[in-house]
Amino acid sequence: MKPKEIIKKARKFADTFRVTNGKKFRLKNFDPADTLGIKSQNKPRAQEALAVGVQAMADFQDKLYAQDKWAVLLIFQAMDAAGKDGVIKHVMSGVNPQGCDVHSFKSPSAEDLDHDYLWRCQKALPNRGHIGIFNRSYYEETLVVRVHPELLARQKLPTELVTKKIWEHRFEDIRNLEQYLSRNGVVVRKFFLHLSKKEQKRRFLERIETPEKNWKFSASDAAEREHWDEYMAAYEDMIRQTATEASPWYVVPADNKWFTRIIVAAAVIETLASLGLEYPEVGPDKLKELAAAKAALLKK
Ligand code: ATP
Ligand code: MG
């Protein structure tokens, strides 16, 4: 496939799941089991397409790195067992590790809690020329912290600042941060891997029943299922409040892993293609330098 065709296809896939205007967003309009009509028998072909996509991504990344102008930040959020780790591993399998950094954000440390909540994420923002991946992010501050108020109580905030408006304020601050980043050449794309409660149950059972997967199972993850509806409400509000033209959310169906990976790859390709990446142009001085170096090399 020619690069132009790959980009066109990627755009077609990714656009369906991209949310740029939060106000119109409703989670119920998105089906976690959607495959855009592709049957699972056609999975091998879909996987071939993914391999082509991964190669295209590697070519773009090479230019991104050489140009040293844009930075790309990919944020992944999801319920447990939605497949964040697998997506990151597969989709980024072709990229040069020198230009790609992955950061996982777990429960905040004592040092983290001694700072504002954006602090630990801001320290991890990607350099120009790099792709940064956040496996969870500051968005947890509007998800797990919203569902479990005791986590907010641990944050040592001055009590007069903890009002009913706290979530509204956090969304505003996050929107402002992302706008600031986009105005500085840091391109932010956010992925919500949208898993159904039923498929999560199936995956948890599989983790319990397969010895090689036992290590992945945590009883506390399963306990979080009791708060499923609260989480879904928090995710919906998060997307409604923070999906913008400059930093959209992709609501990626996550009940079929092969499909999730294709959509994420398509979205990354769509994003990189939109940046007009080219290798830096070589000026007359550099050309002279190259010619002189060649002549010197040939002499010896
Ligand atoms: P994952 O669950 O992402 O696959 P993991 O199982 O290796 O990774 P955990 O030790 O479960 O890692 O850490 C992730 C946990 O940290 C999640 O339950 C998440 O809700 C929690 N977490 C992340 N950010 C925050 C935050 N800002 N405040 C409180 N809890 C957070
Ligand atoms: Mg976990």
Image: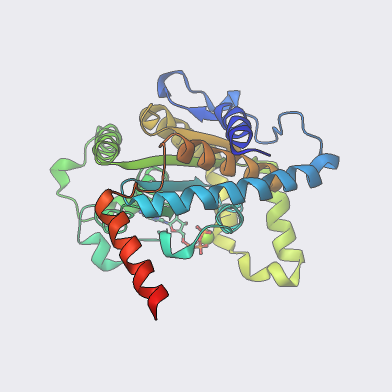
Q: Residue furthest right?
A: 41
Please identify the quarter of the rendering in which residue 39 is found.
Answer: top right
Quadrant, the N terminus: top right
Q: Residue furthest top?
A: 24
Residue 201 falls left or right of residue 241: right
Query: Is any part of residue 270 visible from this angle?
Result: yes
Query: Is any part of residue 130 visible from this angle?
Result: no
Residue 241 falls left or right of residue 36: left
- How is the structure coloured here? rainbow
Tell me what residue is drawn at x 31 percent, y 52 percent.
Answer: 128
Quadrant, the C terminus: bottom left
Please identify the quarter of the rendering in which residue 264 is found.
Answer: top right
Residue 12: % across, % down? 61, 27
- Of residues 23 and 274, the one nearer the viewer is 274
Tell me what residue is drawn at x 76 percent, y 67 percent.
Answer: 210
Tell me what residue is drawn at x 14 percent, y 49 percent.
Answer: 158
Residue 40 falls left or right of residue 212: right
- Of residues 64 and 124, the one nearer the viewer is 64
Rendered view: 97 above or below 64: below
Residue 7 falls left or right of residue 291: right
Residue 126: % across, % down? 33, 54
Residue 283: % across, % down? 28, 48
Residue 32: % across, % down? 65, 35
- Of residues 94 and 125, the one nearer the viewer is 94
Rendered view: 249 above or below 204: above
Q: Residue furthest front?
A: 299
Task: Give the mark count.
Answer: 0
